[in-house]
Image: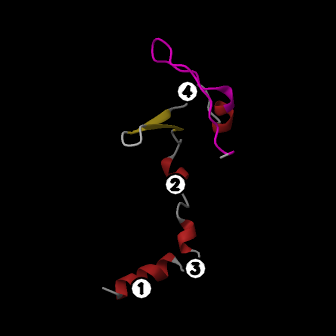
Amino acid sequence: MEHISKIESEIRTKYQITIPEEIRKKANLHVGDTLIWQYDDVHQEMIVMPKPKSFSDKLWGLGKELWEKESSDEYVRKERESW
């Protein structure tokens, strides 16, 4: 788990926090950036991530390893033939 940074920061009186410098640098955060907060009720875990400038750019190529052995066109053709 050396690739995971765990650093503490304190919640101030107006519920403000300071993002530690090491995290800001690794996440390439700057003043004015927007963060997305996610909370998992089941595991009681919180995830904070930078909001991408473009979701489509961020998702481009997601899952491409699924098509290494077979092209997506070939897969769709086979699926249609099975109907």
Helix, strand or loop at mark 4? loop
Q: Disc 1 and disc 2: Cα gap in Å?
A: 26 Å
Count of numbered tags: 4
Q: Do the residues under discs 2 and 4 have CB atoms within 8 angstroms?
A: no
Q: Do the residues under discs 3 and 2 have CB atoms within 8 angstroms?
A: no
* Number of the label disc, if any, that sits on residue 62: none
- Label 4 or label 3, whichever lies nearer to me, is 3
The majority secondary structure of the magenta stretch comes to loop
The vertical placement of 72 against 9, above or below, is: below
Seen as rendered, the residue at the extreme top is 13
Q: Disc 2 and disc 4: Cα gap in Å?
A: 22 Å
Decide which of tag 2 and tag 4 comes sooner along the chain. Answer: 4
Residue at (54%, 74%) from the top-left corner?
A: 67
The stretch in magenta equals 2-22
The vertical placement of 27 against 77, above or below, is: above
Q: Amino acid at mark 3?
A: Lys
Give the residue number, with chain letter if any, for mark 2: 59
Q: Position of residue 82 (x, y in %)?
A: 34, 87
Decide which of tag 3 and tag 1 comes sooner along the chain. Answer: 3
Helix, strand or loop at mark 1? helix
Decide which of tag 4 and tag 1 comes sooner along the chain. Answer: 4
State left or right for residue 33 relative to residue 79: right
Give the residue number, with chain letter if any, for mark 3: 69
Give the residue number, with chain letter if any, for mark 4: 32
Q: Disc 4 and disc 3: Cα gap in Å?
A: 43 Å
Q: Amino acid at mark 2?
A: Leu
* Number of the label disc, if any, that sits on residue 78: 1
